[in-house]
Amino acid sequence: MREDANCQWRVAVRPVGKPKPSDFAYTEEAIPEPGDGEILLKTLYLGLAPVMRMYMQGTGAAGEKALGIGDVIHGRGVGEVVTSNHPAFAPGDIVQGQLGWQTYKVSAVTPQEKIFKVADRGVSYALSAGVLAMTGLSAYGGFLDCGQPKAGDLVVVSGAAGGVGSIVVQIAKIMGCHVIGIAGGPEKCAFLRSLGVDETIDYKAEDVPARIAALCPDGLDIYFDNVGGETLAACLENLAMGARVVLCGSISEYTRDAPFGLTNYTRLRAVNGMMKGFFVYNYLDRLDEAVDALAGWIRSGRMQPVQDVIDGFEAMPEALMRLYDGRNVGVQCCRVREHPHDLALEKGEVA
Amino acid sequence: MREDANCQWRVAVRPVGKPKPSDFAYTEEAIPEPGDGEILLKTLYLGLAPVMRMYMQGTGAAGEKALGIGDVIHGRGVGEVVTSNHPAFAPGDIVQGQLGWQTYKVSAVTPQEKIFKVADRGVSYALSAGVLAMTGLSAYGGFLDCGQPKAGDLVVVSGAAGGVGSIVVQIAKIMGCHVIGIAGGPEKCAFLRSLGVDETIDYKAEDVPARIAALCPDGLDIYFDNVGGETLAACLENLAMGARVVLCGSISEYTRDAPFGLTNYTRLRAVNGMMKGFFVYNYLDRLDEAVDALAGWIRSGRMQPVQDVIDGFEAMPEALMRLYDGRNVGVQCCRVREHPHDLALEKGEVA
């Protein structure tokens, strides 16, 4: 990565199936100049999420333009203000927002970029590319608002070792729930147990419907769905009275040839059950609340901030591919540049 | 129908596709004698509902035994106490409860029969086989609890001219909603307009998805689903922010060869939408509240009690077939015997 250029990753071709290296095009441009009211940001961290494959398909980008071939890929992350022609920002300020897959960005701080200042909370700025950003808000808003957890609830989470999932399972434990996490492979299942998850299901080795039925003899109260498809259908077969199914994501469906057809949605009827979806930006007015709560739990040691950090802007395509291969543990994130604040924290120099 | 025998309709064979006359077997038995603590009821009215075809399949009978070939078909209705060995009942009392498809029944008044006394509310006892029984409770509980209607909401109801639907559309109008009713044929659509429905869609003549999209340019707030299948999928494509989909029934799916696969349930995500199902017996603790409210609206003229009454116990199979052909308007009900109270009401002799 050249520091004297704006390095970028663009859509080369629409992905078919899982994303692969040839779907991405690397370009370099001159570092842009901020105009009146604009700021120049340099990228510190970029977050990754499954939806980015949909962006590359030209869909899924609510509030942002649909991407065409050759466009810089959408992505939120953490940046540092280099120069500012905007009264509310000064050089050195840290922000999170829509930076795109690039190493510099000029921003007019438009509402659609959702650029927010990041306070020093005594935790790494890297967390503002995931756990303390939209990933954390998805977990916090989706689980609390749609899931309505109560102490003692039996909660099943799929994609439990992923970005949103690894936060949801920990919030559920803090709320006093009994938590079953579904993830792929013994390492991820062991990791989930280290987060306090009560029971794990390894979808690569076990019969998921049979295990869910066995672990939920009286039905589950909340299913937090990150994967869709057959796992969702299996959970619908095992609902307790008044169960809530939270639709967060459906990564198992994004790369299917034919759409998945849910035949047993009617199972919601017998138990007065509910299936509720959410879109994270609909919770934007709760971002401060979510970040305050999550950062508080992290500082007090009740929550482990789980980010899977890959180094170097060049690794961005690889970082997205990791999500679709299920190789990430926690929020997938790319460290584009180091920042002294975070280096000091790593060395234990800041409380 | 012989008055000196207990006439019954039994499962002859499991229905394949729509129910047909040869699926039913007619039998006569001696009128049973009530034992200690039991009452003998004679049937006045029996209500019909789509679920009865599922009973005949040996499924769907929550709280009742699964029917085998040769069993008397389950069904709730209105009966008059003939003799009573139970302290809480006296000859002449009117009750609603699980009578089955027969003209007499001995009941031990078990909880599973859900036998409740019917007060004289100045309306026909026939209504206690439908509008003021489980059909009305489905409409009242399902729409208010799952739908959470507010004045000004745009409400779409399928099966709108049917038993539950014709009550839901009227409650929605009372709540100040704008109501779109979906029904089959111009007569039913005209009937819906006579109930105050604002817009109608004739599913036999019109392109339902196109009409829903055209009538809901800003999305619908509540979809009350009595049919499932493609109509449900079409409504999911047209949700307003915070929309509620109420799963009541899915008559379009009951006779399909292969189950319907709902591919666009993920539409709930973008709008923080909710799909909530209910089973009417989960609302049993609200039966009195529902009957009070519905009877009040009927007496004040704000609600039209819509029952499609067919005469004679012999017509029971025909009455069920009417539901599956979509021939009924309102709650399908069979008048097994006349009662002086209701004859007087018909002649206007009772206020």
Image (tube, coloured by chain):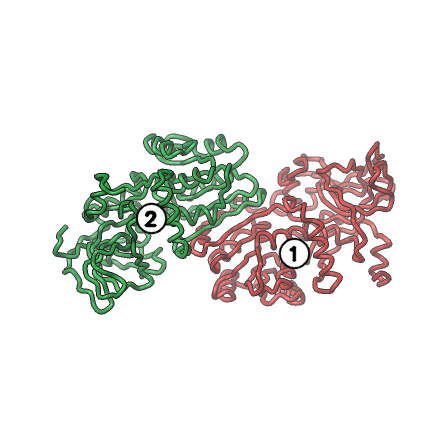
Chain colours: A green, B red
Closest to the observer, B333 or A87: A87
Closest to the observer, A101 or B44: A101
| Left or right: A305 as drawn, with respect to B261 | left
From mark 2 to mark 1, how far is it between C-alphas?
50 Å
- SS for callout 1: loop
- SS for callout 2: loop
Categorize mark 1 by other alpha carbons within 10 Å: few (<14), some (14-19), many (20+): many
Tell me what residue is drawn at x 45 percent, y 38 percent. A156
| Left or right: A190 as drawn, with respect to B15 | left
Closest to the observer, A137 or B60: A137
Q: Count numbered badges in the picture.
A: 2
Return the residue found at the far bottom.
Answer: A36
Same-subunit check for callouts 2 and 1: no
Q: Chain of mark 1?
A: B
Q: Disc 1 marks which residue?
A: B162
Residue A252: percent from the left, percent from the top?
Answer: 38, 43
Q: Disc 2 marks which residue?
A: A132
Is A182 above or below relative to B314? above
Q: Chain of mark 2?
A: A
Residue B205: percent from the left, percent from the top?
Answer: 56, 63
- What amino acid is labelled 2 in the image? Leu
Split into 4 quadrants, where in the image is the C terminus of chain A? Answer: top left
**Residue A274 seen in this snapshot:** yes
Tell me what residue is drawn at x 33 percent, y 52 percent. A54
Residue B175: percent from the left, percent from the top?
Answer: 62, 62
| Left or right: A224 as drawn, with respect to B74 | left
Tell me what residue is drawn at x 20 percent, y 57 percent. A104
